[in-house]
Image (cartoon, helix red, strand yellow):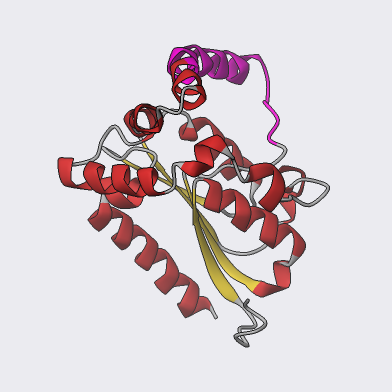
Amino acid sequence: MLRHLGVGKACLLGISNGGRIALDFVSIHPEMVEALVLVGTGVRGYQISGPDEEKEWDEFDARVMAKGATKEKAIKEKQLKDAVTINVDLWASAQSPESRERIFKIAMDNSNALVEPPWGKLQVSPQPPAFARLGDIKIPTLLIIGDKDVSGTMVTKRLSSIIPGSKMVLLEGADHIVNMSKPREFDRTVLEFLDAVIRQV
């Protein structure tokens, strides 16, 4: 798409799975990316650093497991509204009522993805996976995470320690969907970063 539009380089911003896609892209086409903004990002090929982090993940898994089992049961029984409610409660816990309602509607409109997840068919990651190539990223990179995110802080801290020169910003009162739980703070953080990138070009 970028080539079709005649865009030689772009700044990529990805939230959650969008961040994972952005990392996949930059691992294959680093020459086409001017800067990265990764928000509550995932990453393919993530590897736990050691016992301390493994313990954190075990605690996270224990918190999510019961809800996950209930969600899977709801999906199996085609109770998609219940499954979406569980997802929204887990990942969007710090939203205003209006924002939560909007997220819920978007999730319901896309609830077919719960029954037929697109990850395996439509999102084919490169080999080696992006996590193995984080140290090769040589462009300005901003990592944003909300302090109410259920698991993202662990991943974001780790990525920040590996991506050379990257900057990590923790936004208080934000959940996994940072741009909607703290929109003003999110916009200001991203625009300040991009302004700095433009000044360097």
Q: Along the line of sight, which residue is nearer the eye, 199 or 36?
A: 36
| Residue pictured at 33% horizontal, 30% vertical | 85
Work out which quarter of the rendered image holds the C terminus and state it: bottom right
Residue 47 lies in the magenta stretch: yes
Q: Is residue 54 above or below residue 187?
A: above
Q: Is residue 14 above or below residue 175?
A: below
Q: Along the line of sight, which residue is nearer the eye, 110 or 153?
A: 110
Residue 88 pos. (x, y %): 34, 34
Q: Quadrant of residue 25?
A: bottom right
Work out which quarter of the rendered image holds the N terminus and state it: bottom right
Residue 89 pos. (x, y %): 32, 29
| Residue pictured at 34% horizontal, 37% vertical | 175
Q: Along the line of sight, which residue is nearer the eye, 106 or 6?
A: 106
Residue found farthest to the front = 77
Residue found farthest to the bottom = 6
Residue 193 pos. (x, y %): 42, 64
Residue 142 lies in the magenta stretch: no
Residue found farthest to the right = 127
| Residue pictured at 32% horizontal, 55% vertical | 186
Residue 97 pos. (x, y %): 16, 40
Q: Which residues are magenta?
A: 46-69
Which secondary structure type mostly characterizes the magenta part of the structure?
helix
Q: Is residue 64 visible?
A: yes
> What is the tally of numbered marks visible in this picture?
0
Q: Is residue 16 above or below residue 189?
A: above
Horizontal placement of 47 versus 177: left or right? Answer: right
Horizontal placement of 53 versus 49: left or right? Answer: left
Q: Is residue 157 visible?
A: no
